[in-house]
Every structure is written in structure tokens, then in C-alpha cells.
Amino acid sequence: MVQPYIVCALGNAVYHHIKTHKSIYVALVAFLPCNEDITERWAVEQLLVGFQRYLIENGKAENTVKSYCLTVRGFFAWYQGIRGQPPERLLRQEIMSYINYLRTIRGLTNRSVNTKLAALQALNEFMIETGRQTELVLSKRDYLKVQTAYANPSTVSKDQVELLRQQILSERGLRDYAIVTVLAYAGLRISEALALRLSDVDLAAREITVQHGKGGKMRVVFIGDKVVNAIREYLLDRPAIDSPYLFISRRGGALSRGQMNRILSAYSDSITPHTLRHFFCSTAIEAGYSINEVANQAGHSNVHTTLRYTNPTREKMKEKANLL
């Protein structure tokens, strides 16, 4: 019989190697008495591996998979801290207690708590599908109410964005300049921009094809002169490396979100890849785009998300308050 605590301690490869040498295996079993803590941790790791595979097979984005697995680890750690062992199945009363912990002890907002609940709901569905439990203990009806912000979420001006672009161009070069331009004037998510391949960009047709947007959806984004020129100049300067990616690192691979976040934070405390996306949506509305056109460009699945950009910004609302 396989000793799971040995596998956990040594890894599968080492375990199977020593298993073929009976004398070493017997000595090891004697040296490592059955440790319930190691066995439990091994069981949790096995469950998480299966959960991760389940999420990927169901089309979840890479960042969603990482976030959900991190949330489940956090829940298991909380549960084990209270019960002394990881849960064998999900219980509704335990989920409700965890929600209370997140709100009162951790101080998370309702929106953040709902993100955690989405991960646990997916875990619940996975455990049912794999026969670990039969009852559904969590649904969207359990999500906390969140008041949608009225103000336009865009917080940066065109002057600020143009200053950033010029600083990036003069100090970072054409690659990072092109990325910032795509974010600000094409409206792509940072993950979408960094995943672009050379074949996804058609400068003659002035189109970018986002192959795997949020929810795995494909869309075509129409681009203007700023984006076309920035990408064209970058392509002339792009290293002759055999890589399918449009924006490449020094080693020829795709850039990471962390790299771009660090680059932007070096030039601005207020501009991030996400604020550039907000800037695009707000600027596009002001330029005469319809709600549906902006929704298509930005990849919004719900036009109510896009409608926020028709509202005045926080600063303009404050200016109006002074007129009362």
C-alpha cells in the first residue's frame, strides 16, 4: 500500500525509486512513522491539483485559476486553524462562518468577499462532480449585495497619459511605448495585450484579434493611427527572435503582468494598466463611440459595465457639489 506521507515528504519520483529497493523502503518506513499532518497535507495538495485541472478544463483564465486556488488554500488554512484538520466536504454553516470572518476580522469589502465565494462555489461544484459530496451548499444567492459606483471610474486625464507615453518612449523604448499605447488607445486588458501574437495584428486592416479574452471569448478590436504607428515602429525595432508573441522579453518569451506593473509604477503613482483601460473607455465615449461599440472594443459582456463611462468623473461631481 502506498504510504501517502512518504510521497508527500519525498515526492513521487523519489518514492517510486526507493520502492523498488525493498530494504531501503522498509528502513524508511521505520524511520518515518505515520504522520497524520503530512498525510492531510498530501490529501489537500491532491485535491488542489484536481481542482486546478477542473478549472482549466472548464475554460477559466489563468489568473482566475491562480486566484481560486489561492482562495481555497486560504479557506482550508482557516478551517484547519479552527477544527484542527482540513474539511472532507463543504458545509454551509462553515461557509457562512468564513464569510463572517472575512468581513469582521479581515475587513474585506462585499465585493472582495464575493470573489472568495465564487472560488468556493467552484470548489463545491468540483467536489460534487468528483463524488466527494452530493449537496450544493453555495450559490449566487449567497453573494453579498454590492452597490455599483455611479461615478465614471476613469481617474487620469489625456495630458497625464500623453506625458507617460512620451516618458516611456524616451526612457524605455519602442516596445513598452507600443504596449502603453495599445492599453490606452485600444482598450485591451493587460493580459490580452501581453498574450498577443504576431498573427493577431493586421496593421493594414487596422485590426487586432484578441483570441482569448475574458471568459475565453474572441473579439476583433479596431485600432487608430496612434496604435498602428506605435506597433509598426516597434516591429521595425523588434529583435529577430523566433517567437510567436508580439511583445517579447529579452529571452523571446511573453512578458508578465508583474513586469509591466513595475515599469508603469516607476513613472506614475496613479497610472496602472487598468486605469489606462478605464481611460480608453471614457475617452472613446467622449469621442463619439456608442455604448455597444465601446463594449465590443473593451470586451464587456454586459453593457451596464460600459454605461458607467457615460457618467461624470468623481472630480467633476465634486466640482458640481461646490456649486450648490
Image: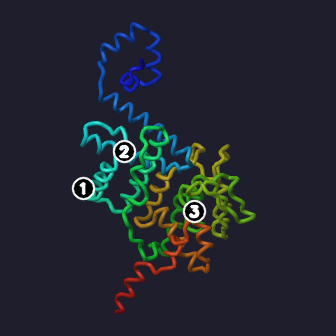
Disc 3 to disc 1: CB gap under 8 Å: no
Is 2 on the left or on the right of 235, as rendered? left
261 vs 307, nearest the viewer: 307
Q: Quadrant of residue 87?
A: top left
Choose the circle earlier in sequence order: 2 or 3. 2
Q: Residue furthest front?
A: 134
Please, what is the three-letter code of the amino acid marked with disc 3?
Answer: Leu
Please, what is the three-letter code of the amino acid marked with disc 1?
Answer: Ile
Residue bearing the label numbered 2: 90
Is 28 on the left or on the right of 196, as rendered? left
299 vs 138, nearest the viewer: 138
Residue 200 visible in the snapshot: yes
Residue shown at the point (65%, 45%) measured from the top left: 243
Please, what is the three-letter code of the amino acid marked with disc 2?
Answer: Leu
In x, y percent, where is residue 190? 53, 58
User: Is 159 located above or below residue 259 in the figure?
Assistant: below
Residue shown at the point (61%, 77%) measured from the top left: 290
User: Is 39 located above or below residue 227 in the figure?
Assistant: above
Residue shown at the point (33%, 62%) measured from the top left: 109
Secondary structure under the numbered disc 3 in the rendered image: loop
User: Is 13 located above or below residue 305 in the figure?
Assistant: above
In x, y percent, where is residue 7? 41, 24
Residue bearing the label numbered 3: 188
Secondary structure under the numbered disc 2 in the rendered image: loop
Alpha carbons under labels 3 and 1: distance apart = 36 Å
